[in-house]
Amino acid sequence: MLTQTGNIVRIAPNRYSVSDPAAVRIIYGIGSPFSKPSFYTPFVGLIPEHPPAFTELSNAKHAAARKRHANLYAMSSLVMYEPFVEKVNGELLDRLDGFAQSGQSFDLFKWMQLYAMDVIGEITIGRSFGMIEAGKDHDGLLWAVDFINMEYGPKIGLLPELHPWYLWIANVFSINDHTKIVRTAIEREIAKRKDAESLPDREDFMTKLLAGLRIGKLEQYDVNNVIGANIGAGSETSGIAFSAVIYYLVQNPECMSKVLNELDSAQLSNTVKFKEGQTLKYLQAVIKEALRLHAMVGMLLAREVGEGGAVVADTFFPQGSVVGINPHVIHQDKSIFGEDADKFNPDRWLGDKEKTSNMEKHFLATFEFSIAPGSTWKTYSGFFIKPSIHVQISRRRHRGEQTTIA
C-alpha cells in the first residue's frame, strides 16, 4: 500500500505507518524523544508497578532498566553460555535423525521453538524445560507465551483501556490465564534456586540475577522481569528465525549448496562455536537475508510523538500521534536493498561496504531439509509473524560417502 500511496499511510485513527528510510533514525535513534505508546502495556509484565523494559513507556525508566541488565546480555556474557546448550543440541540432533530415518514430515516451527525454549531454559534457569524430550509443550508455557504475543497483546494493545479490566476479572475469578502460567513457572524456578542447598557450578542468568539481588544492585522485580523476558520473547523469535533460514535455503538450492560448501571447507569444531560461526560469511549473509524477507515483527513498531510535535517524512505530527515503521515495509525498500528487494539474494550482503552499511542501518532483524509434499509456507500474524510448514529431512551424504539413509 505504501508503494502506491506514498510513504505515510493512516492505518487507524491517530496511527500512521511510515516507510521513509530517514524516519528510522528520527523515530528510533539514540536520544529520540519518541516514547512507546500504551499499545505495549498489555504485553504483560509480572509486576504491573514495575514493568519490564519492553512494556515500559517512560524513556528514562526504560533506559535505566536496560542499563541495570546490560551486562547480562553483553556478548562477552552470552558466549559463556555456549557450553550449557550442548545437551539440548544433542537432543535436537537425535530427533532430527529419527525423522530422517523414518521419512516422517514434521512441523518445522514447532520443533525449532521447542529447541529454542529448551536452550533458553538452560541459559536462564539452569536446566532445560524438557520440551524436545517430551516432543510437546507439556506444561502450557509455550501456549501462554504464544497467547500473549499473538493474541492478547497485539489485539488488546489497540484498546489498552480494556487491559486493567481483564486483570481485575482474572484476579476476582481466579482464572488460570496466560499471565499466571508464566508467573508460576518463573516463581517456581526462582524458589528452587534460592532454596537449593548448593549453588550450580555455572554462571547462568539466574545465578547472576540472584547475586545482584543479594548485594543490592538489583531488585526482585528485576529478577522476575529478566527471566520473564527471556521466556516470553526468546523462544518465539528464535523459532521464527531458525524456520525462516531453513525455509529460504530449501527454496533456493543454489544457496543451500553454497552454505554446505562453506561448511565443508571450514575448519570447525564438532559443535560450531559462536566465533567460528562469525567467520562463515556466506552463512551470515543467508541469515540476514532470511530475516530481512521474513522479519520477526509483523506490526508497526509504534512510538508516540512527544510535546511540541515532530516532523517525520516531511510531515508534521502533533503531540500524541502514534507513528512507526513496519519492518516488512522498510525491508522491501528498493532504494535501500536494490531492485530485487523482493527476492532472496544473500549476495547483496557481500557487496560494496558502503551499501552494506546502509542496509545494516535499516535492518530491523548436517541434515538436508525438503518441503513435505502438499505443504506450503503459511504465516499467522500477531505481534510476531509465525510461520507454519511441514518439512522432511534426510541424512546428508558427505564427500566420499557411498550411501545415504533416506
Image (cartoon, helix red, strand yellow):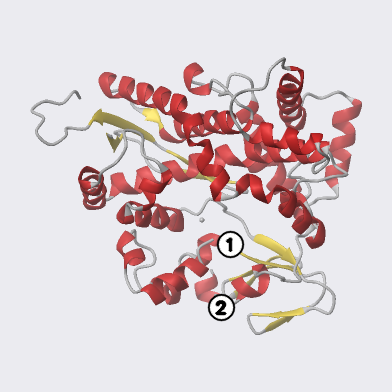
> Where is residue 380 shown, x and y percent of the image?
53, 44
Q: Earlier in the sequence, mark 1 or mark 2?
A: 2
Classify mark 2: helix, strand or loop: loop
156 sits left or right of 389 in the view: right
Q: Is residue 77 left or right of residue 287?
A: right
Give the camera-side residue of 115 and 61: 61
**Residue 123 seen in this snapshot:** yes
Residue drawn at point x = 57 percent, y = 72 percent: 19
Query: Which three-letter amino acid code belongs to the residue tagged 1?
Result: Asn
Q: Which residue is mark 1?
A: 326
Mark 1 element type: loop
**Mark 1 crowd level (few <14, some 14–19, many ≥20, 10 Å Cα):** some
Q: Quadrant of residue 72?
A: top right
Q: Which residue is mark 2?
A: 6
Identify the residue at horizontal 51%, vertical 60% (top origin).
328
Q: Amino acid at mark 2?
A: Gly
**Mark seen at residue 51:** none
Determine whether 364 is above or below 78 in the image. Answer: below
Q: Where residue 251 sits in the image (x, y, percent)?
A: 29, 48
Q: Do labels 1 and 2 touch, CB within 8 Å?
A: no
